[in-house]
Amino acid sequence: KQEAAQAFLADYTPRFAVAFDPTGMVADAYHVWTMPSSYLIDRKGHLHSVHRGFFDADKARIEEQIKQLLTEE
């Protein structure tokens, strides 16, 4: 639900674009059952990793994965 997402984003302001799918088609396509869920996709469009939920302890590891993907061609 958009209200739940907005409440979460009010506490954790991301430094990237966040899109909302009011139809839920994307959530169905990726079998999203946990919010927030993050999907890291490489430049070729391949799914690199899935992160379900948000845990401060995982932040550094996920940031490193993002940096690695950004350096790949």
Image (cartoon, rainbow, N blue to C red):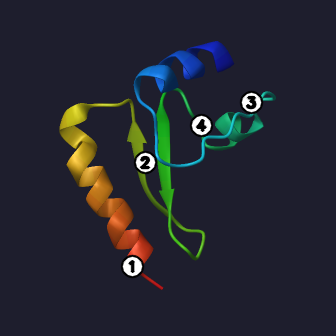
Q: Amino acid at mark 4?
A: His
Q: Amino acid at mark 1?
A: Thr
SS type, badge 3: loop
Q: In the image, which is nearer the foreground, mark 2 or mark 1?
A: 1
**Label 2: how many Cα within 10 Å (few below 14, some 14–19, many 20+):** few
**Label 3: how many Cα within 10 Å (few below 14, some 14–19, many 20+):** few
Q: Earlier in the sequence, mark 3 or mark 2?
A: 3
Give me the C-alpha separation between circle 3 and circle 1.
31 Å
Q: Which residue is mark 2?
A: 50
Give me the C-alpha separation between circle 3 and circle 2.
18 Å
Q: Which residue is mark 4?
A: 31
Q: Earlier in the sequence, mark 4 or mark 2?
A: 4
SS type, badge 2: strand
Q: Is residue 16 left or right of residue 50?
A: right
**Label 1: how many Cα within 10 Å (few below 14, some 14–19, many 20+):** few
Q: Which residue is mark 3?
A: 24
Q: Is residue 8 left or right of residue 31?
A: left
Q: In the image, which is nearer the foreground, mark 3 or mark 4?
A: 3
